[in-house]
């Protein structure tokens, strides 16, 4: 006979409601009890029946996604991947756009709780203690996407930003470039800004090109800002022959600026982006870029959240997905 | 003393629940009763208190948005506008991506009903009878965005697609172009495909250039498809010197194709897009395009839905917002 939640509770020596909590908001159960429950689930090979779970625990079979900026093309791919996984796993997906606004984010968490969303994917934003506390208080299990937390134990899926940036810059050095600049994310409220800058610095140190470390201009998340940052960068360092941009949007803004100044890309300046947006292959010139597996990141985040919701934990708490440098037209041998 | 719902019901000679239904899903009330109620609301200057409404009618102060394709950059601007209006009006916004999949759309309507969403904005898709019946059966008030219905009485907000396309093509004719092609939307499941084609045809007839009417290739909604459609178009009609694309995405795909064939834009071929995406001004060359007031369309749709939810009707059932031709670099005198 198939084991029931009652069997799990008995074996673990806890109440049924504790088992339920472990499955639904594991953070709310003390470590000792939690591991006893998880052990029992494993030993008994307990598999909660999805439909019964819905009836018993008022599951809504809806997942929530919090994204910081709907106009960023990066999230379009994320959403597509996450939605396909949701369809496969039997969830509806509801998306809320926080605009990186703290109050809006917190109120969306409330809205998700009222709507009895089963779990949340929290994308591309720093997990401030205030957010963590709110989510935990609402007892909504969640995972981080294109983000991670050193401070709290929250499952996450992302790429290795430092390594990816390092490889992009190393590629430019190997093309013979010696005067290399960077258009980076502001470090203040960006998850990936600091590690991508560190990757840039590592490549420079390794290449004996530390004089470039200061050749960085920062932008928020839009073309237009990257356009202006490029103006800053080239005004201060007109000798630059290659630019590493930490986003494809930035690369497009950079190329647009250079084009407006009649500077040829890649003839005079090479540009490498980051993300491999759907747009990257259609831009003129087509972008050389560090591809993130955008669709797969979204897909995997939904799977991970599902794993957390159904088993109470995840096998790989901090998962790194593979990036890949894609060489197209915007870069050239120096 | 402020009038109450009871006063409205008394004056209209209907039950309180009928007044409530008129305010919350007017389609479910027969025309005769509905107009008596609306008259009474107007005469009494009845204004339902938002908070009380929430308690009495189980309002959730959440609006739902159904969009057909999250990867289409057009919707990013729509969502931003709609969200800003939601913030102003005190709603949360939940977005679901239907992928133009009938079953998915219907299941999202169910999800919205379960979550007690107050109303829905249904964007950019044909309102098939099946959808109308579902939404009406669920008693969720809704408005159409970048769509309209000739068949059903549903409030809508959009631009005048026929006129906008006509003006874009007329502009190309006035530049001296005589061999003009078009990259259009498939007519089968597109709301704006047929009227934009009609605008193209009208301009051709008016300009005595009816030989161009057959110079049309169709694409779904992506760059890549427009790229291939452009190949088709130029293979069949290599003499074309100007292309009207019914979307900026298509214009980018078209320009990318021409660039790959070493055909200069605008040197040899002029290209005009449609939408004025945020990207249009950063592309190379910058796109000449028919601007839709994308942000304002989203904003207005939320306001209209709010008007419907709070008053039971809308003052302007079929609202047209203004488009505007923006001339940039991708077009030139012949």
Image (cartoon, coloured by chain):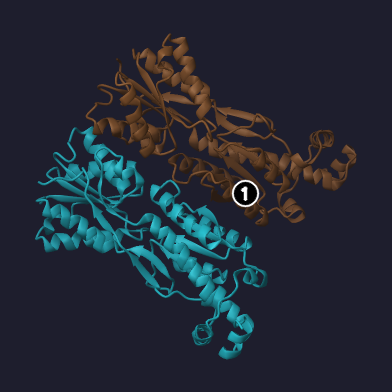
Chain colours: A cyan, B brown
- Which residue occupies 21% across, 49% down? A327
Q: Is residue B319 above or below residue A47?
A: above
Location of residue A317 by image quarter = bottom left
- Which residue occupies 70% across, 42% down? B133
Mark 1 residue element: helix
Q: Is residue A65 above or below residue A282?
A: below
Q: Position of residue A179 (x, y in %)?
A: 12, 50
Depth order, front residue of A105/A56: A56
- Which residue occupies 23% across, 41% down? A231
- Which residue occupies 63% across, 80% down? A17
Q: Position of residue A301 (x, y in %)?
A: 44, 63
Q: Does the image show residue B161?
A: no
Residue occupied by mark 1: B106
Depth order, front residue of A91/A255: A91
Q: Name the side, left or right, on which B303 lies relative to B182.
A: right
Q: Name the side, left or right, on which B213 lies relative to B241.
A: right
Q: List the single residue furthest toward the top.
A: B208
Q: Does the image show residue A64?
A: yes
Q: Name the side, left or right, on which B88 lies relative to A252.
A: right
Depth order, front residue of B237/A180: B237
Q: Position of residue A113 (x, y in %)?
A: 60, 63
Q: Is residue B21 above or below residue A164?
A: above
Q: Residues within 10 Å of mark 1 (few under 14, many from 20)?
A: some
Q: Position of residue B295 (x, y in %)?
A: 50, 38
Name the image quarter holding the N terminus of chain A.
bottom right
Give the letter of the chain under mark 1: B
Q: Name the side, left or right, on which A271 lies relative to B188.
A: left
């Amino acid at each position: 006979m198939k084991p029931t939640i009652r069997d799990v509770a008995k074996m673990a020596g806890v109440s049924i409601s504790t088992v339920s909590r472990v499955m639904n908001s594991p953070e709310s159960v003390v470590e000792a009890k939690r591991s006893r429950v998880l052990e029992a689930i494993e030993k008994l090979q307990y598999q909660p029946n999805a439909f019964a779970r819905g009836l018993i625990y008022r599951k809504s079979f809806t997942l929530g996604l919090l994204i910081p900026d709907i106009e960023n093309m990066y999230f379009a791919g994320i959403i597509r991947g996450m939605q396909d996984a949701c369809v496969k796993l039997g969830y509806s997906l509801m998306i809320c756009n926080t605009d990186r606004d703290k109050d809006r984010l917190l109120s969306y968490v409330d809205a998700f709780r009222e709507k009895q969303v089963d779990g949340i994917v929290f994308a591309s934003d720093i997990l401030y203690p205030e957010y963590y506390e709110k989510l935990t208080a609402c007892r909504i299990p969640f995972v981080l996407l294109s983000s991670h937390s050193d401070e709290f134990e929250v499952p996450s899926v992302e790429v290795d930003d430092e390594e990816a940036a390092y490889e992009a810059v190393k590629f430019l050095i190997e093309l013979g470039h010696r005067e290399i600049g960077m258009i980076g994310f502001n470090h203040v409220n960006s998850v990936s800004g600091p590690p991508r800058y560190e990757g840039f610095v590592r490549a420079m140190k390794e290449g004996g090109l530390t004089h470039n470390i200061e050749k960085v201009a920062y932008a928020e998340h839009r073309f237009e800002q990257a356009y202006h940052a490029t103006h800053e960068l080239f005004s201060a360092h007109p000798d630059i022959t290659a630019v590493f941009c930490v986003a494809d949007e930035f690369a497009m803004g950079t190329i647009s600026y250079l084009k407006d100044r009649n500077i040829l890309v890649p003839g005079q300046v090479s540009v490498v982006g980051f993300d491999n947006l759907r747009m990257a292959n259609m831009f003129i010139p087509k972008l050389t870029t560090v591809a993130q597996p955008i669709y797969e990141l979204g897909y995997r985040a939904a799977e991970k959240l599902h794993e957390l919701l159904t088993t109470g934990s995840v096998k790989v708490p901090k998962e790194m997905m593979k990036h890949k440098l894609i060489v197209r037209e915007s870069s050239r041998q120096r």
